[in-house]
Image (tube, helix red, strand yellow):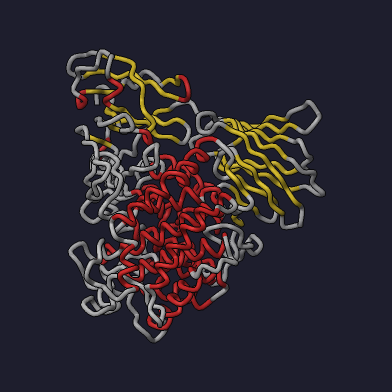
């Protein structure tokens, strides 16, 4: 099952994912820096506000002190949090590690990380076992509840935290890498060939082991990840009311046709399975995963990129089951979806995967945190029928029941998951292959790397994206031989153009840029400019006719951003007294752009005939102005 690879072996720079081969090589935080604009602002808020906020709640709610109790032999008395609370500490450590790498070092953050690692390390047992919920007198035995206990899931996040540390500070002597290595060795001993052949009810250990194996050069960990992936579908876990599909134990990974069950579990498993397929050269498995991605994006994914339409089991629904008002669209499912799409992009180089990453970043992951980065959505509805209530700043909220962003949840996976994503975001911007460099996500950036032929390349990217569709790439180095610069043209960007301006010539070459990828090959000289012009005018998008929940509705998009109708914007218009449910979109009037990339549409009250031009809100900004009604899919006049 060996595959033919089109790229050279990956050098492990500061990247979350470093496959040994594939179509594209990721460029890391030491090669790409986001220098301004939309995503730089979010990264700054994340690094300044969100990380401190998360650490404060981990301490306050007892999830960090759980490790102190374990180290002092006082468990189970006094333990707080759910069975998976250890994992939130590990995701936080991963986020801090990437943030240190993003900043090029930070003494204060480094000290905070080391203090927490010391507390975690003190709780590890002599044989490498590490969990605050199981394994001690008065607690359930180790590995006694793999369906719901999350022991291996927690360790998967520990392994990803260690990967971040290996990649950003390989010479660190804080002990995190050793803690992870000892735990991984134990997992291999217990669950290796001929041992316990069960899986974890929540996939994550697979992706953690695979990447830890890459980072430490330990093939045993990759092999253990492979064993876990292959054991899915054998029915080793107890059946439950939602069926074994909930934790992907109903069908072998390579035999499945679409992602199903719990949306986070499904995407984490698919991510780990992609890692395994790449590392083992399993062509059959990789193509099966790509087919599943295709079917899932086409039939089980919201216009925002969100996934999961069932609240009770946080799961995918059937094909075309995408009700706007019951959208679960968990933030963590968005993070996991990006992980899966990114791995397929690196393996295959298909820009569709980068399109989906962009959609999910702007309209799910960016939607969760508040502008200040200290309150979050757990689930991301597409239709709020009644105004929510403000969450109290010092009260833990039930996860999906919070109708507005809340500071913390009893299931708090989403805040640290967004934090680790934003801290490492520069690693998802660009890649390289044998021919040159590819840009996948657009932000002001500095790119410095060495091509496969040894040429050093420096690029500066300037853009106001997504407010503007103009992306300007300036070459800062002279090339010894031709190389190729490729830029993604999103699927929504009909009518895009590419302009090449050779340095000092006063000339320019303009050409159409078809959706997909547009490339320029030349012996670039310092001062050359390549400009991508993407049409970001607002547009109506129609749903697939098989999504019966939103038939007769339209959504407005502009560039990569989805917009929504929010009740607060009716104030002062002829529709102020209208019932929100009676509003209809006049599809005969095209949406128009206003200042700063805003959008205005014509809206009609179906009962009274009153009409007004109403501004829409970017979906990721909804409810920033207080409680409101909101809908993404708006019914059309006469529907």
Q: Quadrant of residue 144?
A: bottom left
Looking at the image, residue 368 sits to the left or right of residue 470; the answer is left
Which residue corresponds to the image point at 71% horizontal and 54% vertical from the top-left? 450
Q: Residue furthest bottom?
A: 194
| 18 or 291, nearer to the observer | 18
Q: Residue at x 36, y 25 (%)?
A: 616
Instruction: Determine whether 581 is above or below 224 in the image.
Output: above
Side (left or right) of 188 relative to 149 = right
Residue nearer the viewer, 45 or 55:
55
**Quadrant where the C terminus lies?**
top left
In percent of width and height, residue 564 lies at: 34, 30
Asked whether residue 344 appears in the rendered view, the answer is no
Taking the image as shown, residue 455 lies to the left or right of residue 97, namely: right
Q: In this rendering, is residue 205 above or below 373?
A: below
Provide residue 467's location: percent of width, then percent of height: 50, 29
User: Would residue 131 be seen by someone viewing this image from the given angle?
Assistant: yes
């Amino acid at each position: 099952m060996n595959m033919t690879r089109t790229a050279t072996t990956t050098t492990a720079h500061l990247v979350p994912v470093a496959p040994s081969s594939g179509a594209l090589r990721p460029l890391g935080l030491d090669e790409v820096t986001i220098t301004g604009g939309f995503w730089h602002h979010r990264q700054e808020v994340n690094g300044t506000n969100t990380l401190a906020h998360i650490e404060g709640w981990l301490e306050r709610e007892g999830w960090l002190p759980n490790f102190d109790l374990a180290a002092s032999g006082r468990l189970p008395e006094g333990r707080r949090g759910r069975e998976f609370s250890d994992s939130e500490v590990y995701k936080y450590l991963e986020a801090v590690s990437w943030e240190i790498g993003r900043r090029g070092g930070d003494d204060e953050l480094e000290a905070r990380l080391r203090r927490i690692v010391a507390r975690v390390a003190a709780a590890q047992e002599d044989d490498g076992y590490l969990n605050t919920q199981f394994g001690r007198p008065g607690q359930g035995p180790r590995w006694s509840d793999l369906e719901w206990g999350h022991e291996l899931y927690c360790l998967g996040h520990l392994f990803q935290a260690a990967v971040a540390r290996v990649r950003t500070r390989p010479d660190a002597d804080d002990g995190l890498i050793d803690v992870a290595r000892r735990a991984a060795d134990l997992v291999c001993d217990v669950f290796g060939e001929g041992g316990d052949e069960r899986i974890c009810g929540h996939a994550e250990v697979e992706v953690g082991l695979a990447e830890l194996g890459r980072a430490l050069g330990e093939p045993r960990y990759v092999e253990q990840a492979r064993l876990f992936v292959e054991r899915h579908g054998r029915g080793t876990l107890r059946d439950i009311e939602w069926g074994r599909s909930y934790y992907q134990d109903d069908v072998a990974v390579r035999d499945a046709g679409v992602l199903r069950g719990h949306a986070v579990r499904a995407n984490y498993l698919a991510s780990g399975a992609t890692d395994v397929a790449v590392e083992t050269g399993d062509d059959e498995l990789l193509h099966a995963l790509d087919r599943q991605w295709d079917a899932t994006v086409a039939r089980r994914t919201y216009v925002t990129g969100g996934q999961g339409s069932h609240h009770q089991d946080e799961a995918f629904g059937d094909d075309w089951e995408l009700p706007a008002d019951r959208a679960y669209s968990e933030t963590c499912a968005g993070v996991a979806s990006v992980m899966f799409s990114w791995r397929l992009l690196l393996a295959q180089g298909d820009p569709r995967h980068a399109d989906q990453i962009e959609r999910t970043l702007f309209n799910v992951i960016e939607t969760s945190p508040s502008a200040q980065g200290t309150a979050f959505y757990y689930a991301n509805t597409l239709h709020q029928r009644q105004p929510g209530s403000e969450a109290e700043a010092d009260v833990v909220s039930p996860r999906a029941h919070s109708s507005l962003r809340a500071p913390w949840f009893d299931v708090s996976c989403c805040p640290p998951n967004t934090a680790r994503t934003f801290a490492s975001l520069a690693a998802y911007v660009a890649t390289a292959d044998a021919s040159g460099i590819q840009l996948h996500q657009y932000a002001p950036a500095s790119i410095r790397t060495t091509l496969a032929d040894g040429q050093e390349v420096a690029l500066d990217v300037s853009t106001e994206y997504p407010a503007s569709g103009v992306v300007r790439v300036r070459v800062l180095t002279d090339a010894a031989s031709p190389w190729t610069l490729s830029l993604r043209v999103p699927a929504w960007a009909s009518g895009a153009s590419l302009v090449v301006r050779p340095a000092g010539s006063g000339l320019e070459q303009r050409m159409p840029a078809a959706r997909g990828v547009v490339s320029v090959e030349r012996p670039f000289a310092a001062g050359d400019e390549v400009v991508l012009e993407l049409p970001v005018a607002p547009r109506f998008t129609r749903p697939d006719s098989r999504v019966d929940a939103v038939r007769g509705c339209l959504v407005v998009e502009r560039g990569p951003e989805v917009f929504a109708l929010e009740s607060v914007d009716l104030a002062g218009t002829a529709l102020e007294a209208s019932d929100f449910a009676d509003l209809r979109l006049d599809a005969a009037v095209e949406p128009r752009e206003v200042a700063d990339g805003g959008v205005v549409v014509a809206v009609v009250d179906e009962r009274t005939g009153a009409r007004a031009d109403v501004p829409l809100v970017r979906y990721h900004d909804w409810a920033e102005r207080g409680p409101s009604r909101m809908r993404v899919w708006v019914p059309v006049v006469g529907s």
